[in-house]
Structure formats: C-alpha cells, structure tokens
Amino acid sequence: MHDFTATYTDLYQINMAQVYFQQGKHEHKAVFDYFFRKLPFEGGYAVFAGLETLLEVLEDFKFSDDDLEFLKDQGLDSEFLNYLKGFRFEGNIISATEGDIVFPTRPVLQVEANMVEAQLIETILLNILNFQTLVATKASRIRKSAGEQMLIDFGMRRAQSTGAYHASRAAFIGGFEATSNVVAGKDFNIPISGTMAHSFVQSYDDELTAFRDFANSHPENTILLIDTYDTLKIGLPNAITVGKEMKSRGEELKGVRLDSGDLSYLAKKCRKAFDEAGLEHVKIAASNQLDEYVIRSLKEQKGPIDVFGVGTNLVIGDPDAALDGVYKLAFANDKPRIKLSENLAKLTLPHKKQVYRLRNSEGKLTGADAVTLRDETDIKHMNHPFDVSKSLSFKNCNEEALLHYVMKDGIRTEPPKRLEDIKVYSRKRLAEFSEEFQRFENPHLYKIGISDQLLKEREALRNHYKNKDA
Ligand SMILES: Nc1ncnc2c1ncn2[C@@H]1O[C@H](COP(=O)(O)OP(=O)(O)OP(=O)(O)O)[C@@H](O)[C@H]1O
Ligand SMILES: O=P(O)(O)OC[C@H]1O[C@H](OP(=O)(O)OP(=O)(O)O)[C@H](O)[C@@H]1O
Ligand SMILES: O=C(O)c1cccnc1
C-alpha cells in the first residue's frame, strides 16, 4: 500500500538535480551516508527498521506523466524533464541488516549512485528510515518491560495519520506480536487482534446484553471491555456471567480488557474473581496510555496482566517524536567530501566506509563499533570521532562487517525478507547486548570509533578547507 512516486521529495532535491543535469554532472558518482547523531529516548541503542520498505520503493521509483506535467507547470526545464521521463533508481544500497542494533555517528546505510539519483531519493529515504527506526526502538523498549507478556499495537487512531501503516510494521520488528491495524496485518502478515469499544457497550441499554451478543457472534474471540460503567461492581460480574454461559456451551471467554483506573489493583481483583468462578482461562488485557515505564511499574506491582495494548506512546515515538537521522555526502566525482561545522559533533565523515562490530576471540561483543575506510581490515586502534585525545587499542579482535550490498544497479541482491525473520534477527542481535546497554536510566555508552586512516583523511580535508578560501 504505497503510492510513492519520485515526487515524494522536497523541491530542493529536484532543483539541485536540474543543475547537475545542466552542468553535465548528473553522471558523476556520489556516496551518501545515512546516520543519526542522538539515540532516541535517552536509551542505549536503536533498532534499525524500514530497509525493506525503502528497497520496495526504490525498485519502483519513477516520475509519472502527471508528475512531469506538474513539474513543467512549476517552471522546470523541459530538457531536464525529458531526462526525468526515463528516470529510474539504478544505484547501489549498502546497508546494515534490518533489525540490527545501531548507534549514532556510524553510517547505518550508504547510497552509491549518480548525483541525480542519490539526491532525489534523500527525502523518502529519511522519511522511511527515521520513522521506522524510532518506532522499532520504542517497541523494543516496551518489549523489554513486558517480558513474556503479549503486546498488541493499538496506535493507528493516534498515529501521525497514515504513518500508522509503517508504525505497525516497525512495532512488530521491535517485539510486538499483533496489531489492531487491519491493513498492516494484511500487507505485512502481522497477526491482527481486536476487543470492543466503549461505544459498543454504551449502545445497549444494559452491559450484559452487549456482552452476550458479542460472545454469540465471536465465540472464538471474545474479549469484553469491562470498565464502561464500573469495573468491579458491574463489568466484572457481567463478564463472569458470560464466561460461565460460554463455558456451559463448551466455549471459552478469551479475556477482559481494563482501560481505566488502577490497572494493577483491578487486574488482581479480576484474576481472583475469575479463578474463584472456575474461569482460570480468562486472560486480562490492559490499555490506557501505556509505555515502557508504566508497564515496568505494573510488572513490579505484580499486576496479573496477560496482554498489554499500547497505542499513542508507541506509534508517535513519545517523547521524542522523531529520530534525527541525516543523509550526508561523503564522496563525489572521485573525491572525498566533508561538511565542516563549528560544532565538532556535526563534522561529517568523508569517504566510502565500512563499519565493523568488534568481538573478542570468542565472538562476544567488546562494546564498540569501528568506522573505517571501505577496504581497511585488521583494525587495532580507533579514535573518538570528536575528541582526538581519546582513543582505544585492541588486539585479537574479530571484526564483523556491518554494511552489505542489498541493492546493486537498482536491483535487490536478495529476495525480500519476511517480517517475522527480521523480528527474530533483531531479537537475537539485541540479546547480545548486556543489561547495561538496555537499561532505561543512564545506559552504558556503546563506543563508536574511527580508524587511524579515516581520522587522517578527515583531518587532511578539514585542514584543506580551513587553509583555503573554499
Ligand atoms: N497500577 C498502576 N501503576 C502505574 N501506572 C498506572 C497504574 N494503573 C494505571 N496506570 C497508568 O496511569 C495513568 C492513568 O491516567 P488517567 O488518570 O488519565 O487514567 P484514568 O484514571 O483511567 O482516567 P480515564 O477514566 O479518564 O481514562 C495511565 O497512563 C495508566 O496506564
Ligand atoms: O491509550 P493508548 O495507548 O493510546 O491506546 C489506545 C486507546 O484507544 C482506545 O481508546 P478510545 O478512547 O480512542 O476508544 P474507546 O472508546 O474504544 O476506548 C483504547 O480504549 C485505548 O485506551
Ligand atoms: O481492539 C481494541 O481493543 C482496540 C483497538 C484500537 C484501539 N484501542 C483498542
């Protein structure tokens, strides 16, 4: 369900592309890095998501006749528009594996393409990767708090409009099991799940009849919302009545949902009452502005909640709302390129690069990724990217290359991955990181360093521009 054409971009990309074309620079090769500078949620890691979505978009990234008509009306050059008629993305994408655990500063993905291609895809690339990485990271934190309990994404209604579609995808990668979002379920093969709304109960003159009608219509899948009038005095007794009626018919009431009040206290009361009524199988679901902190607290209180429905805070990536991922030129027309800044943390890393995860001789994480020039191996020393007084030496390290070609000349190097496989991979990768990196408060800092050679190249470029009227 995507209807992205090549006009899904910012105007400045098209304006720059026209100049490249007119100056005969459109065939010049460029390398752009996608990376972010700050981890979301003041956490210790991020979960990379959105790659498959991006590749799908790039495979079919072209201007329609309508688009070109529109651009003509905006005053763009007719020769350039003629060139855009046959435009396709025929570049390379070198990327981290979707679902992998990623960190600031180091490239997460690189685009190698001609100047026009690389520029025209910038906006959609950032739009897809920043959002899905943000939501997958949030989902992974919520999963951390929820432990083995089931997590359902309820966020569609609160999401930033159609962003809900990809939020549900990213939530699944980050550890959710199901979604209320039917179209995302259909397109991404995510299990769908649903209970009932307060309006359903309100529309009846009495709650019990509402519950009975629902149970008759969905005997396999009845989860009753019990807080419309009074959870303990009205909702719970009615649910027990329906649960017993279903049991006598050989059916099972699947669960109840709590959506207000003290969720832990109410869950304990419900559990006890269901167990005493011989309805041990009835599950307790809870919703209402949940996030990783509320769920952690509910677990600490030992609230017997089996299922958490999480909406707003998941899909809007609260409180951050955006990942600050950027797309910066590292190489163009056979030369390394740099963006200087007064703020050292905003210096870019020039050149075609690789990123290595450093492991000890047993393959265990050492707590650092090293950014190197593309063909460097046997890294023994790395430098803090922005504080040259800090560096780190290591020996006998295994280097795991983290960036791989996933698209060559506009064609994927392997078939699309199943979302379930991406999720399993992500869980496995996160499990390698100790609790210190995963905790919410002041997490351990995962180190990112740059190799001696990359540092040398960066400093040479910096000095070149400092000493020259650029
Ligand atoms: N036992 C609990 N421990 C920690 N947080 C809880 C507990 N129970 C509920 N919460 C959370 O506290 C917040 C309660 O918000 P709020 O006061 O708006 O809910 P409410 O009392 O149900 O009101 P409303 O009826 O308007 O929904 C929610 O984020 C909810 O998830
Ligand atoms: O709190 P969130 O994490 O965002 O989860 C989604 C919320 O959406 C629904 O409420 P809403 O009032 O929209 O509809 P309802 O009448 O069906 O409860 C649901 O009952 C949850 O409370
Ligand atoms: O199925 C539900 O209970 C549901 C779906 C969306 C939002 N809130 C609740």
Image: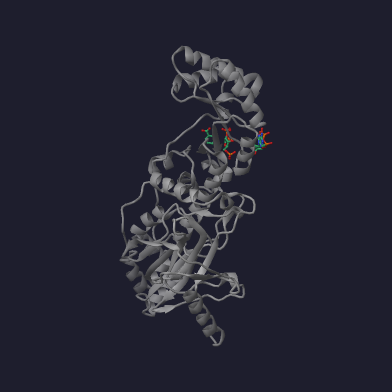
Q: Is residue 84 left or right of residue 435?
A: left
Q: Residue furthest bottom?
A: 468
Query: Splitting the image into 4 quarters, where does residue 314 fall?
Result: top right
Is residue 157 at least partly visible in the picture? yes
Is residue 205 at least partly visible in the picture? no
Residue at image coords 66%, 28%: 265
Q: Is residue 336 left or right of residue 45?
A: left
Q: Is residue 452 above or below residue 59?
A: below
Depth order, front residue of 349/170 = 349
Residue at image coords 51%, 62%: 368
Depth order, front residue of 6/460 = 460
Depth order, front residue of 288/268 = 268
Number of numbered markers: 0
Q: Is residue 193 left or right of residue 260?
A: left
**x and y percentages locating residue 286 in the rendered image:** 58, 32
**x and y percentages locating residue 372 in the rendered image:** 45, 70
Colour option used:
one colour
Query: Splitting the image into 4 quarters, where does residue 120 fall?
Result: bottom left
**x and y percentages locating residue 417 in the rendered image:** 35, 49
**x and y percentages locating residue 50 in the rendered image:** 44, 53
Residue at image coords 59%, 59%: 445
Residue at image coords 44%, 36%: 192
Query: Splitting the image into 4 quarters, where does residue 42 fall?
Result: bottom right
